[in-house]
Image (cartoon, rainbow, N blue to C red):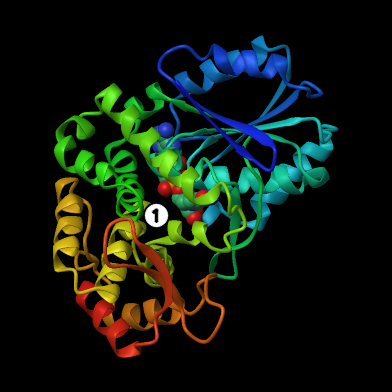
Amino acid sequence: MKIEYRINKENYQIYYLNKKLSQITKDLEKMKSDKKILFLFDKNISKKIRSEIYSELKLSGCSVYEIEFIGSKKNKNLKAVLKIIDFMISKGFTRKSIVLSMGGGVLGDLSALAASLYMRGMIYMHIPTTMTSIVDSCIGGKTAINYQNIINSIGTYFHANKVYILDKIIKNLPEREYISGIPEVLKCGLIKDTKILNFLENESLKIKKKNSEIVKDLCLRSLKAKIYFFKDDVYEKKNRLMLNFGHTFAHSIEMAIEKNINNKKELLRHGEAVGIGILCELEYASQNSKLIKKTKEILNLYNLPVNLKHLNLNKQKLQNDIFKFLFLDKKRINKYPRYINLKNVGKPKIEEMQDYNKINIIINNIL
Ligand SMILES: NC(=O)c1ccc[n+]([C@@H]2O[C@H](COP(=O)([O-])OP(=O)(O)OC[C@H]3O[C@@H](n4cnc5c(N)ncnc54)[C@H](O)[C@@H]3O)[C@@H](O)[C@H]2O)c1
């Protein structure tokens, strides 16, 4: 199963591979490369899958070099990017060499950034391994690292030539990693496609049990919705901004928790923060209580958090920090932070949040 799309006269493919991985070897054989691959993988992925991919890379006749990472916000930094670049210099990589990353959003974002910077851009391929990365970050070309406590403050736009989604990776995912991808799917449903919302509601049991056909459908529907928003607006001038629905609050929540954390276990997954962020932005936008209720119900169906009340943190500090971090959001162009105003499904708009009192009430309600 394949999705193909075009950006600036270039073709890009996403493959959904059920069992066989030979598509990867085939693609590598056809590619005009210098036959050198840097295989970057997340250490938490099962060894069996890693070695299966390694064998495919070797079968293609390429020289394969490896670096392992652990996906974590803490490792999404300049040091990690320089480690990749230093390694490629030491092994004589050229702009015709290949970077293949296998990991979640963190490893994807930083490997793609390194691949975009080295020699002003090399061949980049990606195997996403968390639900967030499978349904969202594997396409769209946004690369980034965090710097000076600001999420994604350094980055480029650089697309993976090929993306491979592996059914066996989804089957092996730990529960929390799997479920935390759902809010990004929910986001696509809310901004684009009611069918996704119905699907999330009606097929929740099968989705939770990882039924192969249903999960494939879920992933491909989300990716198609994402492609709709970014393919004619890669640099996020207009349409693509809508994909940030929930993220103005989500990023502030993530940064505030990270700053105030005592126990690493209390860190939210990115997708979990997005779910809460979606609710905050719906609250700010609308009197559409039906839509807020439906969104909460879907999050509840998957046992996803709808607030931060379970965290054992200083509420006042958290409140101040979430408010403060809203103003560091990259979408801000004037005095006020911007967010996605959604009053009805499929009708997102970018707007400023000018009512500080309302913002504070919304933050207070989730604490
Ligand atoms: N570029 C984009 O368009 C985009 C979109 C959304 C999110 N993001 C970025 O993605 C990041 C979050 O990504 P994430 O949620 O995938 O987190 P992540 O990459 O940190 O992975 C979460 C955890 O899962 C582990 N893991 C990864 N794959 C696994 C597997 N198959 N089996 C077991 N464990 C596995 C990792 O080691 C890590 O501990 C954020 O930095 C966010 O900014 C980017």
The residue nearer to you, when weighing 366 against 339, is 339
Q: Quadrant of the C terminus?
A: bottom left
Q: How many marks?
A: 1
Q: Residues within 10 Å of mark 1 (few under 14, many from 20)?
A: many
- The residue where tag 1 is placed is 270
Q: Quadrant of ligand 1?
A: top left
Q: Quadrant of the N terminus?
A: top left
Query: How far across and how far down the image is residue 134, in percent?
Result: 43, 37
The residue nearer to you, when weighing 169 against 84, is 169
Which of the 4 image quarters holds residue 290?
Answer: bottom left
Query: How far across and how far down the image is residue 117, in percent?
Result: 75, 49
Residue 357 vs residue 298: left or right?
Answer: right
Residue 267 vs residue 367: left or right?
Answer: right
- The answer to whether any part of residue 32 appears in the image is yes
Query: How far across and how far down the image is residue 111, in percent?
Result: 63, 43
Query: How far across and how far down the image is residue 328, in percent?
Result: 51, 76
- The answer to whether any part of residue 71 appears in the image is no
Q: Residue at x 68, y 50 (%)?
A: 81
Q: Is mark 1 within 8 Å of ligand 1?
A: yes
Considering the numbered disc 1 on the image, is that residue within a helix, a strand or a loop?
helix
Q: Residue at x 24, y 83 (%)?
A: 361
Residue 309 vs residue 147: left or right?
Answer: left
Is 337 situated above or below 238? below
Q: Residue at x 14, y 54 (%)?
A: 297
Q: Amino acid under label 1?
A: His
